[in-house]
Image (tube, helix red, strand yellow):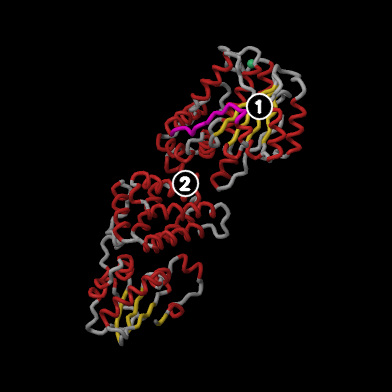
Amino acid sequence: MITLFPSFPCSSLEVLLFAFMSLYRKYRPRDFQSLLGQDHVREVLQGALLKDRVSHAYLFTGPRGTGKTSTARILSRAINCLSPVDGFEPCNTCEICLAALEERLTDLVEIDAASHGLVDDARALVEQARFMPTQARKKIYIIDEVHMLSKSAFNALLKIIEEPPDYVHFILATTESHKVLDTIKSRCQRFDFHLANDQLVIAHLKDVCGAEKVYPDEGALAVLAEHARGSFRDALSLLEQVIDMPELTSQQVMSTLGLSDESSVHRLLDYLFHDDSAQALDMVEELYQQGADLSQFCQSLLEQLRLRLLKDPKNCRLLLDWVAVFYDALDQLRNPIIPQLPLEMAVLKALSFSSAIPSDTSTAALASFEALGTSPVQGSIQGIPHGMDPAQSQDANELLPQSDPGFDRDALLNAVQHVPLRTLLRYSQLSFSDQQLTIQPRSAFEVNKMKQKELLSQLMEAAQGQFGQDVSLHFVVRPQELSPLDRMLSPGIRSQDLKSVF
Ligand SMILES: [Zn+2]
C-alpha cells in the first residue's frame, strides 16, 4: 500500500496542524456509524452496500478534513469485509479488515496523486488493475488529491474507469473537483462532503477529550472549533497542541496557539473605521511582538468583514475594497520577507480607500459596524480619541513658528469640505505666519496622505480662501511621532527631511 502524503502546509497555523496528527489518526472514524457530519453520503453508501450495487467509481469532493479519505477507507473495507455488520459496516476484525487497517492488504492501493500524478504512474496502475485480486474479493484504488494528476495521467486512467473489470473499484478524492476532467467526473458517482458546524465539532472534541480524560472548559472548546473552521482533522490537531496544559481555558488555548481573540480584530477594524493609522500600525507591531499568528489574525479579520458584508450588502463598497486588500495580504503572509510588512501595507491601503470615499458612506459603514455590538473603542466618527480635545493638543513645539495673532484655526477647519482631510487637520498642529501655513500631522504617513493630489488641492483651496492667493504650505513631522512603518521604511528620517514648500 502506498503511503498517503498530506498536502504541503502553507500558513504557520497549517505548519502546526501538520506537525500534530496523532490524535486525528487515533480517533479517525473506522466505520460508517462514527463518520460525523456526512449523513447524506453515509446513507447512500450504506444502501448501495446492502443492495450489492456499489459503483465502480466514486468521486468524493469537499474541503480538507471533512472525512473523504476516512470514508474511502471505510467503504473499501466494507466492500471486502468477510462478515459485515448489518450488511454494510466493516467488522474491522476479520482477516481482510485487519490487513487493510494494518496497511498490508495488497488489493487496497492508496495513492497520493500529488506525488504520483505522472502518466507513468497512471499507466502502471492501469496495468496492475488488470490482474485479479489476490487476497480480497475486490481490488480497490483510492486516489487522493486526484486533481493533481496530469492530463495525460487522467487520460490513461480514463480507459479503465470507463470499462472497469468487475473486481475493481476506484474511489477518487479531491478538494478541487473543478480541476478533474469532465470525462472522469461523468464516469463517477459523486459525493460532496460538507464542513461540519461548530456544534458538531465541539461534540466530537468533547468525546475525544472524555476518552483522553481531559476536561477543557466550554470557551476553550469553542475557540478550537472556531479555528478548525469545520474540519475535524484541524480541530483534533489544534486540541493535540494544548491537551497537556494543566488547565484548558479559552485564554490559555489562544495564547498557546498564538491565536488572536476577536477583540483584537474588532480593535483593528475600529482603528481603520476611525481612520487612525498610527494606532492601527502600532497594533500590528504589538501583535507581532506578542508572537500572534498574523495569517490567522488576517483570516479572522476577513471573516469579520465578510459578516459585515452579509449583514449590510447595500453598504459594501468600502468593505469590498478592504476584503480585497486583506485577501492579498493573507497570500503575502504565507512567505513574507518581513513578517509584519504585508499586514502593515494592507492597513495603509485600507486607509487610503476610506479616505477616497465620501464620508457618509464611511460613517454609515461605521454606524452599522457599531450596531453589531463589536466596536470596543469608544470615540466619535471623526476619529478623535475619547476625552481628547484636538485644540488642546496644540502644545508648544519648536518646529512650529509662532502663529500670527489673527490666525483662526477653527475657521480654516470649517473651510475644508473634504471630511477625511478635515479629520487629518484636526489631529495636526497648525500655525500660520508670513503667509505660510505650517502643518504638523501625527506621522510621516499622514504627511504623505495629505500630499495626495486631491487632498492637497482641497487644502490649498481652503487655505487660499482663508489667507489669500499667495499662501504657501509647509509640512513637518516630529521624529518621535513617526509610525512603526515610517521608522522601518526610513530609519534615518528627520523632520527636516520631510519639510516641503509648495
Ligand atoms: Zn471485516
Q: Is residue 133 above or below residue 301?
A: above
Q: Quadrant of ligand 1?
A: top right
Out of 324 and 101, give the one closest to the viewer.
324
The numbered disc on residue 259 is 2
- Dot 1 or dot 2: first in sequence order is 1
Q: State the residue at coordinates (36%, 80%).
A: 473
In this view, the mark in front (1 or 2): 1
Residue 444: where, in percent of width, then height?
Answer: 42, 71
The quadrant of the image that shows the N terminus is top right
Q: Is residue 423 above or below residue 339?
A: below
Point out the stretch of residues depicted in magenta.
186-197
Q: Quick check: can you spot residue 63?
A: yes
* Dominant secondary-structure state across the stretch colored magenta: loop
Residue 340 inside the magenta-drawn segment: no
The numbered disc on residue 59 is none
Residue, disc 1: 170
- Residue type (three-letter) at the residue carrying disc 2: Leu
Q: State the residue at coordinates (61%, 21%).
A: 55
